[in-house]
Image (cartoon, rainbow, N blue to C red):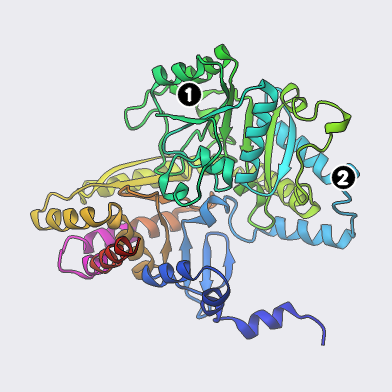
């Protein structure tokens, strides 16, 4: 009998969580059951997911920001079919394949200026690892600098740049020579750079954890401009991690454009894949690139076996085409503003909304203690157990009551983050805002089901602390 993937999926659909419990991450299975996210999705299209019963879920998570152009876009599907039909040679390695050259050309044009040299990997963390190596090779220095509260990935170098104990704890010593500064603190930044030990200063123009950026939260609008100037002064490369906030997510092709920046190295992934085949990219200036591949013996000193594979390159080319052809970068900016304005309108009714901030379709909703005395007392109890339980309640309510996927924006913060596809329209915006309004309305009663769910989360959090 031949292999039939369609029959295999049909026969085993619904055993998803049993399989993961036995063979993959059973702790994740437990979490998903606890927060009410243990769904089996059968189909996806655009902004929506569909379970086995045909129920429709509004996807405002987008695979952590991957599905900027929406799920299962027909242009990408056709590109994949066409590449398969051509029976191209693939990953010969000792050759220069056409599709990787074409994507390099397209990425360089999108990045602008004199950033004309590309390297392809498979993920955001992989290209951020490459950025560390490129910066060290180009400058001859060992030190790296990143912002507090940043997230750059979970492999060792990227994890070290990620200033977050929740991800770092338990893995022993990390990469030496990495330091951190607070966003907005130019004095501390110059103090670090003045040593001339720092090869590269890496920033997420819009931080994924909490959606922080200059111009909000008391950070001066011109912080990045001045930081970049300091890097130039002291010979440090200025690196923009655009893995999540780039390629339209923040309402510009690259988020650094909001501040008129000219980074030495740009990293990207997520949206570039179109959601099909993983692809990450570095784009930089030729002298920096040649600092790595400096002579013939070093022509493959940094490499990635699957980095330039044809399917990934085709997906990258198709995605960039769709972003331009359908004007999705502009749409991200427009729909993001519309969505934020609508959510801000809810703050007049729900004093638990502290702030709505974001750029394009990368938005944070931050909550605060309500004015009602009973609710404030309940909030304080939960906050003492585990800061961040309240946004977990909101995320659960949006899913359980309204079939809307969102996420908590990070550890120890009262923030949810929404990352909708850029293709959202009036229908999706109205549905999300109505759902959020309804969930916050339910939170007005400290004896209602939302706070009961919160109490259950608190119980699990206390149990976890006892076993830690």
Residue 130 in which image quadrant? top right
Q: Residue furthest left?
A: 373
Q: Secondary structure at mark 2?
A: loop
Reply above or below: 448 against 220: below
Q: Residues within 10 Å of mark 1 (few under 14, many from 20)?
A: many
Q: Would you say 83 lies left or right of 206 here?
A: right
Image x and y of residue 466, in percent: 29, 63
| Nearest the eye: 171 or 166 | 171
Q: Residue at x 63, y 56 (%)?
A: 275
The residue that disc 1 covers is 224
Q: Residue furthest front?
A: 172
Reply above or below: 286 against 333: above
Q: Residues within 10 Å of mark 2 (few under 14, many from 20)?
A: some
- Decide if residue 248 is in sight here: no
Label ID, residue 191:
none
Q: Residue at x 89, y 50 (%)?
A: 92
The residue that disc 2 covers is 97
What is the spatial separation of the Cα atoms under label 2 and label 1, in whole angstroms? 37 Å
| Nearest the eye: 16 or 153 | 153
Q: Magenta residues, as a range?
A: 434-454
Magenta stretch contains residue 438:
yes
Reply above or below: 86 against 94: below
């Amino acid at each position: 009998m031949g292999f039939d993937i369609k029959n295999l999926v049909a026969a085993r659909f619904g055993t998803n969580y049993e399989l993961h419990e036995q063979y993959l991450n059973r702790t994740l299975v437990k979490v998903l059951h606890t927060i009410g996210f243990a769904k089996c999705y059968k189909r996806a299209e655009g902004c929506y997911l569909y379970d086995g019963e045909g129920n429709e879920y509004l996807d405002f998570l987008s695979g952590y920001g991957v599905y900027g152009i929406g799920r299962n876009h027909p242009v990408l599907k056709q590109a994949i079919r066409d590449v398969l039909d051509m029976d191209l040679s693939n990953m010969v390695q000792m050759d220069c394949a056409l599709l990787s050259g074409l994507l390099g050309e397209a990425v360089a044009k999108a990045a602008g200026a004199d950033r004309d040299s590309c390297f392809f990997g498979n993920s955001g963390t992989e290209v951020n690892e490459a950025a560390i190596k490129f910066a060290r090779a180009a400058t001859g220095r060992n030190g790296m600098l990143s912002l507090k509260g940043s997230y750059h990935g979970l492999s060792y170098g990227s994890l070290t740049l990620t200033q977050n104990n929740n991800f770092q704890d338990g893995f022993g010593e990390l990469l030496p020579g990495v330091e951190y500064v607070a966003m907005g603190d130019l004095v501390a930044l110059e103090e670090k750079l003045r040593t001339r030990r720092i090869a590269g200063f890496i920033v997420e123009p819009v931080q994924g954890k909490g959606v922080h950026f200059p111009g909000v939260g008391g950070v001066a609008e011109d912080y990045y401009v001045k930081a970049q100037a300091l890097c130039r002064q002291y010979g440090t490369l200025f690196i923009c991690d655009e893995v999540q906030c780039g390629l339209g997510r923040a309402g510009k092709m690259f988020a650094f454009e909001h501040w008129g920046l000219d980074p030495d190295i740009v990293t990207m992934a997520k949206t570039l894949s179109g959601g099909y085949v993983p692809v990450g990219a570095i784009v930089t200036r030729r002298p920096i690139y040649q600092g790595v591949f400096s002579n013939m013996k070093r022509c493959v000193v940094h490499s990635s076996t699957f980095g330039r594979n044809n399917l990934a390159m085709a997906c990258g080319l198709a995605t960039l085409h769709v972003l331009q052809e359908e004007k999705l970068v502009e749409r991200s900016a427009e729909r993001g503003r519309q969505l934020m304005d609508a959510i801000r309108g809810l703050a007049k009714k729900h004093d638990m909304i502290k702030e709505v901030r974001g750029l394009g379709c990368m938005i944070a909703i931050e909550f605060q203690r309500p004015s009602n005395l009973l609710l404030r007392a309940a909030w304080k109890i939960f906050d003492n157990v585990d800061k961040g339980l309240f946004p977990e309640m909101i995320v659960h309510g949006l899913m359980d009551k309204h079939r809307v996927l969102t996420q908590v924006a990070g550890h120890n913060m009262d923030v949810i983050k929404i990352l909708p596809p850029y293709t959202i329209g009036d229908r999706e915006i109205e549905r999300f805002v109505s759902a959020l309004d309804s969930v916050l309305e339910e939170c007005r009663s400290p004896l209602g089901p939302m706070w009961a769910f919160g109490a259950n989360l608190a119980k699990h959090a206390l149990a976890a602390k006892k076993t830690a």
